[in-house]
Image: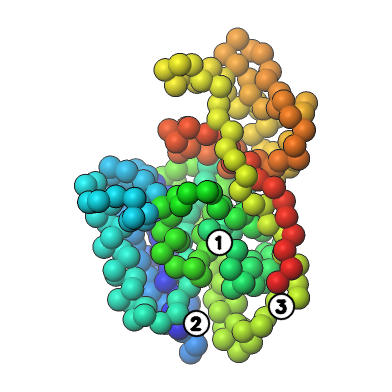
Amino acid sequence: MEHLVLVGSTHGNEWTGAYLLKHLETNKDILASKFFHTHYLFANEKAFENSTRYVERDLNRSFNFSDRKQDIHHEEKLARKLRSQISALSNNEEYLLVDMHTTTADMGTTLIVDNLSKFNLQLLSYAAKKIPDMKAFAWIEDTKSGFINEINEKNITIEIGPIERSTLKQESYERTLECVLVIKDFMEEYKLNPSIEEGEEVEIYKYHSKLDYPRSDTKLLKAMLHKDFEKRNFEVLKAESPVFYDLSGKTICYAKDDKLIPVFIGEASYYEKGFACCLTKKIKLKI
Ligand SMILES: [Zn+2]
């Protein structure tokens, strides 16, 4: 691995990664390595200035270039620009793409991948040992989502929460930095031993489906998250688990017993995307 491409402010209102990126870029010794070059990419300046997730459309759903004939919105043009910037930086050599995010959901430290390549599994397995409460989420849907990570097979998204949007707080900042430093260590160890973590088993929460809020015909919410559900990320949903609470005060329980596990429960930016949480299945994969 010749390069580490570190990205922040893919979402302009997720300040943790944005500020950490600025700090790391100013203090290059922190990620300096004799094994690889580090590149710092501040993705969406304009959204960061506006303190919004995006200007016209979600940048982290805009990297599916084959789905559109031309770039119309700010983020579509930006995605294309970032892709060519990254390919110039990496000089067509191998690189790891690391994108730093936060969530309003109570998920702690989650590392997200968009594919289950051997390299990604090695990295997840290594990180899980170094960061005891870390979870691994493989967000792989039937159709590509347009995540920035989709431009490179070797990729990882750092997702830290809960933290409100457009805020900067110690715990999220430290957790993000911890992940970045573990990734740096992994890259150095991988360089010395590319079969690192081989034979190990890694626990993954694999994307299954989405669960939306009960809504009216005009898409307005008919219910909110149940207070007992809000903090239940990574816990198996049971048939009697309370999930929603409707406007008249009635509890709505999860109807099935399919052993699915919710993540991103109540993430604020997913109201507009039409889901209350992602449902996952826990799997174990041997490397
Ligand atoms: Zn984000």
For the residues bearing labels 2 and 1, Cβ distance under 8 angstroms: no
- The structure residue drawn at horizontal position 56% and vertical position 22%, both measured from the top left corner, is 214
Q: Earlier in the sequence, mark 1 or mark 3?
A: 1
- The structure residue drawn at horizontal position 41% and vertical position 52%, both measured from the top left corner, is 146
Q: Amino acid at mark 1?
A: Asn
The x, y position of residue 151, in whole percent, is 41, 64
Q: CA distance from mark 2 to mark 3?
A: 17 Å
Residue occupied by mark 1: 115
| 122 over 195 or under it: above or below | above
Q: Residues within 10 Å of mark 2 (few under 14, many from 20)?
A: some
The numbered mark at residue 1 is: 2
| 197 over 248 or under it: above or below | below
| Quarter occupied by the C terminus | bottom right
Q: Earlier in the sequence, mark 2 or mark 1?
A: 2
Q: Residues within 10 Å of mark 3 (few under 14, many from 20)?
A: few
For the residues bearing labels 2 and 3, Cβ distance under 8 angstroms: no
Secondary structure beneath dot 1 equals: loop
Q: Residues within 10 Å of mark 1 (few under 14, many from 20)?
A: many
- The structure residue drawn at horizontal position 65% and vertical position 45%, both measured from the top left corner, is 280
Q: Nearer the viewer, residue 2 or 249?
A: 2
Q: Nearer the viewer, residue 219 or 266?
A: 219
Residue occupied by mark 3: 198
- The structure residue drawn at horizontal position 62% and vertical position 84%, both measured from the top left corner, is 194
Give the number of the mark in front: 2 or 3: 3
Q: CA distance from mark 2 to mark 1?
A: 18 Å
